[in-house]
Amino acid sequence: MQDTVVLMERRKGLDGFQLKLIALIIMTIDHIYYFGCSLAEMPEIMTLIGRIAAPIFVFFVTEGFAHTHSRGRYLLRLYVCGVLMQIGNLFVNLCFPMQNGVIVLNGIFTTMAVIVIYLWWIENLRRAWREHRRGCAVLYALAMAALLLSIVPVQLLMPVSPLAVQLATIFVPSPVWCEGSVVIVLIGIGFYYCRNNKRAIAVFYTLFLCAALALQCLSSFDWTVVLSVFFMWLALPFILLYNGRRGRGMKYLFYIYYPAHIYILAVAASLLGRVL
């Protein structure tokens, strides 16, 4: 009887495929807004709605890390997709320039790779510490700090070698210059360690966004930022609807759709901008 109740509970809500599909639709609305701004004024609500998508994808990256059969292949796939996307961005920006200063900057694959790197290193650090391999644990801590501080030599190189800086932003998965920066990476780490407790997810995510907003408001108050953070928080109800089931096995849908729809929108905006 108890097993039947648990099974019925897991059937409630939405599975992974359904939630990813919702996030894809929301993300597309955001990108239509962004590239549409090169042609005309777009409704601000479109990009605010788009804030919902990234946290959902980040949540499922942590789920993927937790359940993948090979963390190495999972990380390599994300990293390679991130590098290819950065190169694709350069090509599209060069060959299909858009008006109003709009350029392709999207790179969520790299952000996902950074989250996986840090989760893997944190897990290895914890294991080494439990096994009293203190030196190994310290090395993992230093590696995490080094990747975070990699922005320093890159900044120093900027006036000397812009090409070296460009190559670094393509090939170095930094938590500082990846899309969403440190904030999204920290959200991903928090989601991973709260993933088995929906209440913990809700508390962590709400408090984290409140803290991030408070820090932002200390420097300057902006209602646009407040609305953006609020719409990011609206990803929480979708995440809490997750029933733990994978759903339909369209593994590579996001890997294909993400760059494809961005480049289609960017090229279309560029071509329309030439004739309008």
Image (spheres, rainbow, N blue to C red):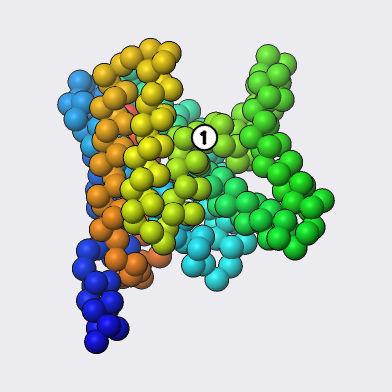
Q: Position of residue 242 (x, y in %)?
A: 29, 61
Please name whichever residue, 177 or 149, is drawn nearer the observer in this view of the structure: 149
Q: Position of residue 231 (x, y in %)?
A: 26, 35
Residue placed furthest toward the right: 135
Image vertical order of residue 249 relative to residue 159, above or below: below
Q: Is residue 121 above or below residue 157?
A: below
x, y percent for residue 96: 40, 30
Seen at 40% across and 65% down, the residue is 251
Count of labels in the image: 1
Does the image show residue 97? no
Tell whether 211 sits left or right of 111.
left
Residue receiving disc 1: 182
Image point (29%, 66%), residue name: 243
Q: Residue at x 24, y 87 (%)?
A: 1
Query: Based on the displayed image, in which of its 4 quarters is residue 4 positioned?
Result: bottom left
42 horizontally vs 140: left or right: left
Residue 241 location in percent, x, y?
A: 25, 58
Mark 1, other Cα within 10 Å: few <14 / some 14–19 / many ≥20: some
Up/down of 62 relative to 115, above or below: below
- Kindly identify the residue that appears in the image at 52 percent across and 67 percent down: 68
Quarter occupied by residue 3 = bottom left
Instruction: Identify residue type, mark 1.
Output: Val
Q: Is residue 176 visible?
A: yes
Find numbered disc 1 in the image and state the secondary structure of the residue it sits on. Answer: helix
Quadrant of the rendering where the C terminus is positioned: top left
* 51 and 83: which is toward the camera: 51
